[in-house]
Amino acid sequence: MTVLLLALGAGAVTGLALGALGGGGSVLAVPALIYLLGFTPAAATTASLVVVTVTSATALAAHAREGTVRWRSGAVFAAAGIGPAAVGGLLSRYLPAALLTGAFAVLAAVAAVRMLRPAATSAGGPGPVRASRVAGAGAGLGAVTGVLGVGGGFLAVPSLVNVVGLRMRAAIGTSLLVITINSLTALAARSGSAMDVEWSTVGPFAATAILGAWDGKRLAARLSAGTLQRLFACALLAVAAFMLADAVG
């Protein structure tokens, strides 16, 4: 019963962050699965992909109804990440637990810094769209998703704005398409290790994450985006420091 309650609570917080910020909330899933629910780093990243996939797909459907998904641009961006996501998913099962934990801690710190120091928007708009830049950004995001089991919305959204040239609302909606495709690919590559995941725990976690995402949207309407990002970034820095200490300890 205690494990179930922890899974429900952690899933709700993860979904709340996802819904309020539109990205980055999935970074909470892996440390919650490791330190609250006792998953190994490898099992946690696999389970996180399940949570990321279902929450992203659910949010994608909502954004599609609002017309904020650019399907062609998203498909091109995601196509570049399919191969790296699959390779990353296969590679992850052979990486030492300490390396996975340390890499995830660094990623969480990067996400926090990006939220504390949002990139300024150029008055002249994005530069010309280059296929090589789109391919590089898409491949990088796919690799991160495959190895570490995170959606990478905090990386996808700025890439879609600055590299592909989408407006912010369209970038957020389109990023969900990219994240869903990458997560499904990485999850398929990990199908052999899926048997190690406790689905009785992951199921409630994912369910409350979906519900929490809807509450997060309502929270975002009441608080400023800057306030939400600063609060989340500070929490994420604390998580990153704890995981890094655990990895090197």
Image: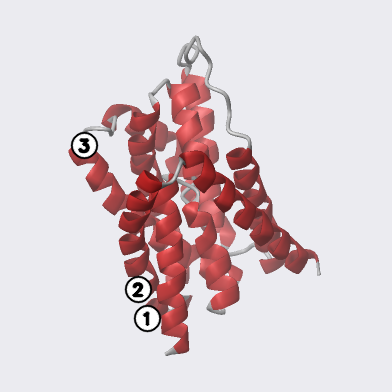
Q: Left or right? Give the position of 149 relative to 58.
A: right
Residue at the image position 46 percent from the left and 20 percent from the top:
131
- Kind of residue indicated by mark 3: Glu
| Of 27 and 21, the residue lying toward us | 21
Tell me if I can see residue 39 in this picture: no
- Kind of residue indicated by mark 1: Ser
Q: Are marks 2 and 1 in contact (CB under 8 Å)?
A: yes
For label 3, the crowd category at 10 Å Cα-Cα, with few meaning under 14, some 14 to 19 and many 20 or more, is: few
- Kind of residue indicated by mark 2: Gly
| Of 172 and 179, the residue lying toward us | 172
Residue at the image position 28 percent from the left and 34 percent from the top:
69
Disc 1 marks which residue? 200
Residue 167: image location, x then y, percent: 38, 24
Disc 3 marks which residue? 66
For label 1, the crowd category at 10 Å Cα-Cα, with few meaning under 14, some 14 to 19 and many 20 or more, is: few
Q: Is residue 133 above or below residue 33?
A: above
User: Whole-Å distance between the Cαs marked 2 and 1?
Assistant: 6 Å
Which numbered circle lies on residue 106? none
Which numbered circle lies on residue 203? 2
Where, quadrant-wise, is the N terminus in this rendering? bottom left
Q: Secondary structure at mark 1?
A: helix
Q: Secondary structure at mark 3?
A: helix
